[in-house]
Amino acid sequence: MSDILARPVRFGSNSGQPVTRRDGIAKVTGAAVFAADNAPEKLLYAVYVPATIARGRVVHLDTDAAKAHPGVTLVMTPQNRPALQGDPSEKPTMFSFRVEVLQDDTVRYAGQPIALVVGKTLEAATEGARLLKPRYTADPARTALDDNESFGFEPEGFGLPAGAEHGDVEAGHAAADKSVDVIYETASQYHNPMETHAVVAAWEGDRLTLDMPSQALAMSCAGYAFFFGIPAENVTLRSPYLGGGFGSKAIPTGPQVLAILAARETARPVKLMLTRQQMFGPVGHRGATRQRLRLGIGAKGALTVIDHEGVAETSTFDDFVEPAANASQGLYAAQALRSTHRAVRLDVGTPGPMRAPGEASGSAALECAMDELAEAAGIDPLEFRLLNYAETEPGTGKPYSSKALRDCYLQGAKRFGWAGRPLQSGQMRDENGLLTGWGMGTALFPCPMFAAEATATLRADGTALVETSAADMGQGAWTALAQIAADSLGVPLDRLEFRAGDSRLPDGGVAGGSGHTATAGNALHAAGSDVIAQLGQIAAEDKDSPLHGAGNARFVARDGRIHVEGDETRSEALADIFARAGKAEVTGNGSAARPPEAAEKHAMHSHGAVFAEVKVDPELCQMRVTRLVGAFAAGRIINPRLAESQLMGGMIWGISFALHEEAKFDRRSGRVMNADFAGYHVPVNADVAGLEVITVHEDDPYVNALGIKGVGEIGITGTVGAIANAIWHATGRRIRRFPIRIEDLLNA
Ligand code: MOS
């Protein structure tokens, strides 16, 4: 592996091309089959019954009425819920949280299951669920950070160091010539992929087949196998398409466990699909945060301290704490750094990873605080960031594996036209009299890799087949991955068949942490390289081959030929090698994971810079983001079209975070009041005006053999701060709570 890392991998002609999605036509024509499209013989339909209070007990369910319905097959409640073989309070896999599966009649959050009703039709099950008419005893619900006094508990969840400290923080405060001490708040947000959580579960003896969207097929199989006491290989999970995941589809969830249990109990296949409203609770969310930032600078503008304290919500029965303050560990050079996290227990479902977990919320606050400090110092915000540019990772002192952030700043600023921006706020108006402001923020996201395996088969007729299980979440992974595989085998893309989205294939790892292309891509590349090495060896041992005697060389494939690496004069057509060897095909295996020593030596992040223009109506305080320019450096870009689309998606989420998205709780019932797309606002086309993405060239010899980082999540970071800073620049008002609403400006 270290050998590979030391040399840049040479690539064929597929990578780097803006190929359109290979699954595009299937999706737009409706040919793509999503989990809930499956309808096996004898299918039963499950309806999930959520608690409508947030804290208390269920004292009565009219199960007799529900059971009496002629179309109802099963009414599952805590009274009759069949035993699970695995303890539901355990977390069987990475990223898991405790599943709620009708363990008792206690209600811990609104949206928790209190029953599952199964019927011969969806209508019958829905009617059965309605007949349950639950009665509760309810206690006052605590759904806001201020509702629970027990601040100060230090979480251990999500691999969080509760705090990290570097340098002498008190000395950093004391040395500050100018400082800011500000509190920023972020709202709770819920995952809303277009496809809600779904499963079609079917048992055959102790073998389980699941049609279910999953960001992590092997991990999902292991998780469900644990709860049902069967070996993981007894679970077949088919997940050819996902209508989005955003972090919520990587783990076993309670609703899905219950549906699988119902299938076992009824000995029939059972389908469950959550409604939009039911997404608000049992399948994770981004918890609200309150973050205090104390930043100081010396006389020349260099940061003496970044002191970032995060408080975040978790549920009463499990720990997941948004690691927001971690965002301050990787970015700006400061004499001293401290980040701490505290958790508050609330009567809400357990939060979980949601699109740029930690960094999205943390960088929103950090980038605004940096802007406030730049204002206090009278320095241009971009210049201020360049002044505090870190050449090594501040929190660890490690060198970066690569960091083309300076280029991002410069290219982004140039495209945006940042030069000439007035330093003061309230200076610009457009031709219609709208207040106009420009703001910026730095984007940062780590680039992890998971472990993955793949196989590749090259055939004598020049066609190829590659296999790895990981699903395409809609991000275009299968297209980019196919480009990598085709290049490693030296075949055109249209000769390559790509099989994925099924747990029976080699484990493609986790499509999460923005690491899918790096993870599965390197495994596929290794599998393809194995095939080419085998064929090269066959040729090297063959007297009639131009490659004869090249046994110790490395071989690369390009345009249907095998070349001796570094000696362009020596090559042979793949078809000739196959023909003389009398073989129909050659299969190779590959795997990928980041060696721990590589991760030890370098800090690994994707970087970027986002510039925003907003216009604000001076009377109505309506805000519009009129232009966004993001420049990102994320290592090797395999498919610029899809990468830009991912980065754009992230930036649109940034608009959402800054101006739209917020789950609002009814303080009396503890329920989310706006649990649908009418009330839970996300940007529509009219909210997204000019949006431009620049991908900045970056070679990274350390992250993995292919030099791929990640582009999925970073677009949110940087964007939120850039928008808020632009609103300040337009209006002179600092709004320290997200999302920023019209009334915040009216009342400011
Ligand atoms: Mo993510 S939170 O890895 O979609």
Image (cartoon, rainbow, N blue to C red):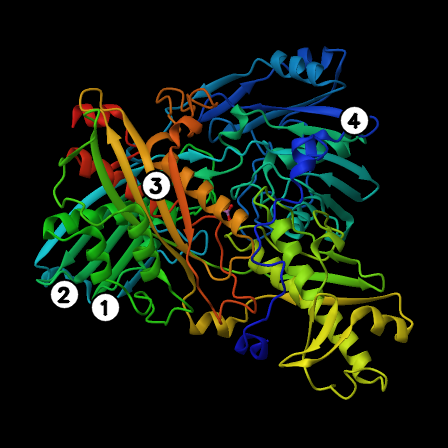
Q: Secondary structure at mark 2?
A: helix
Q: CA distance from mark 2 to mark 4?
A: 67 Å
On-image quarter of the N terminus: bottom right
Q: Is residue 92 left or right of residue 746?
A: right
User: Up-down: is 54 above or below 152?
Assistant: above
Q: Secondary structure at mark 4?
A: loop
- Report the number of numbered marks: 4
Tell me what residue is drawn at x 69 percent, y 44 percent: 85
* Farthest-out residue, right: 582
Residue highlighted by disc 2: 171
Q: Dot 3: within a 10 Å radius of its alpha carbon, few (fewer than 14), some, or many (20 or more) residues?
A: many
Residue highlighted by disc 4: 43
Residue 4 x %, y %: 58, 76
Q: Answer yes or no: is residue 588 visible.
A: yes
Q: Nearer the viewer, residue 56 or 610?
A: 610
Q: What kind of residue is marked 3?
A: Leu
Q: Are marks 2 and 4 in contact (CB under 8 Å)?
A: no
Residue highlighted by disc 1: 167
Q: CA distance from mark 4 to mark 1?
A: 62 Å
Q: Are marks 2 and 1 in contact (CB under 8 Å)?
A: yes
Residue highlighted by disc 3: 628
Quadrant in the rendering for residue 331: bottom left
The answer to which of marks 3 and 1 sits earlier in the sequence is 1
Beta carbon of the mark 2 residue lies under 8 A of ligand 1: no
Q: What kind of residue is marked 1?
A: Gly
Q: Are marks 3 and 2 in contact (CB under 8 Å)?
A: no
The answer to which of marks 4 and 1 sits earlier in the sequence is 4
Q: Is residue 21 left or right of residue 456?
A: left
